[in-house]
Image (cartoon, helix red, strand yellow):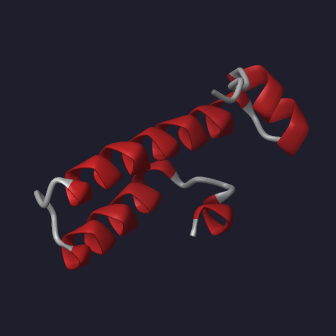
Amino acid sequence: MYPTKTDAEMAKEYDMTIEQSQNEVHYKMSIKFLDILKRRGIVSDVEYTQIDELNRQSFSPTLAKVYV
């Protein structure tokens, strides 16, 4: 298991505010949950893409390009 960074550590490393780093964490959590739903067949590929786009709009992750 990989050690996780605190919001403050992530903010410092990527020169973000605490709010921005929290948005990153929330976005990552939404992706993990969405991946589970997709694996279980609860959401389709199209729905996954649509939900991910809404999550990106909601959380405005600074590092979104990295998650692709």
**Which residue is depicted at the point 73% across and 25% down?**
5
Q: Looking at the image, how many numbered discs can be counted on the residues?
A: 0
Q: Where is residue 27 in the image (x, y as percent from the top left)?
A: 48, 46
Judge whether residue 16 can be spotted in this image: yes
**Farthest residue, direction bottom:** 46
Whether 51 is drawn above or below 14: the answer is below
**Which residue is depicted at the point 75% across and 34% down?**
17
35 with respect to 8 (left or right): left
Location of residue 54 (image quadrant): bottom left
5 with respect to 50 (left or right): right
Q: Position of residue 43 (x, y in %)?
A: 15, 63
**Which residue is depicted at the point 54% across and 55% down?**
60
**Farthest residue, direction front:** 1
Location of residue 24 (image quadrant): top right
Q: Where is residue 39 in the image (x, y as percent from the top left)?
A: 24, 57
**Which residue is depicted at the point 65% across and 40% down?**
20
Quadrant where the N terminus sits is top right
Quadrant where the C terminus sits is bottom right
Whether 13 is drawn above or below 35: the answer is above
Location of residue 65 (image quadrant): bottom right
Whether 5 is drawn above or below 49: the answer is above
Judge whether residue 15 can be spotted in this image: no
28 with respect to 37 (left or right): right
Q: Position of residue 64 (x, y in %)?
A: 61, 62
62 with respect to 24 (left or right): right
